[in-house]
Amino acid sequence: MENIDQRYLVQQNKLSDDALKPPVFAKVMRSKEGKFEGVSFIKNKEKATIMTVEQAQEVIDWASNKKSNAHEYATKIICVGQ
C-alpha cells in the first residue's frame, strides 16, 4: 500500500498588520467527487486541511489567482508541527 505524504498546511499572514493579527489557515473545499473547488481561510489551525505538498501548491496558486487582494498576504506552506 502506498503511503501518501500528507503533512502540510497553507498559512497566510496579512503583510500590513506588522504581525499583530494571527495567521489564518486554508480549508479546502472539494466536490463530492473530490474535485478541487476553492479555499476558505480560517483562524482555527486544528480545522485546517492537511494535504500533500502538491495540493498545498494548488491552494497557493488558487489563492494568488482568484483573490483580488492576494498581494496583501504572505502565503506559505508549513509542516503540521510548525
Image (spheres, grey):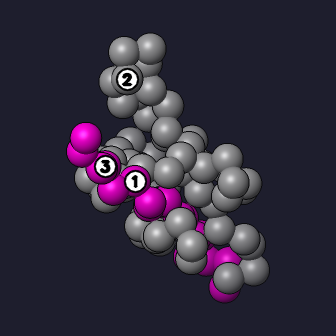
Which mark is on residue 4?
3
Q: Marks 2 and 3, Cα distance to the nearest angstrom?
A: 16 Å
Residue extending furthest toward the front: 1
Circle 2 is placed at which residue position?
Answer: 34
Residue 68 seen in render: no
Q: Amino acid at mark 3?
A: Ile
For the residues labelled 1 and 3, say whether their Cβ atoms are less than 8 Å apart.
yes
Q: Residue at x 25, y 41 (%)?
A: 1
Q: Residue at x 31, y 49 (%)?
A: 4
- Which sits in the foreground, 1 or 20? 1
> Is-magenta flag for residue 7?
yes
- Which sits in the foreground, 48 or 7? 7
Q: Marks 1 and 2, Cα distance to the nearest angstrom?
A: 16 Å
Magenta range is 1-18
Compared with 80, 1 (above or below) is above
Task: Quarter of the image for the C terminus: give it.
Answer: bottom right
For the residues labelled 2 and 3, say whether their Cβ atoms are less than 8 Å apart.
no
Which mark is on residue 6?
1
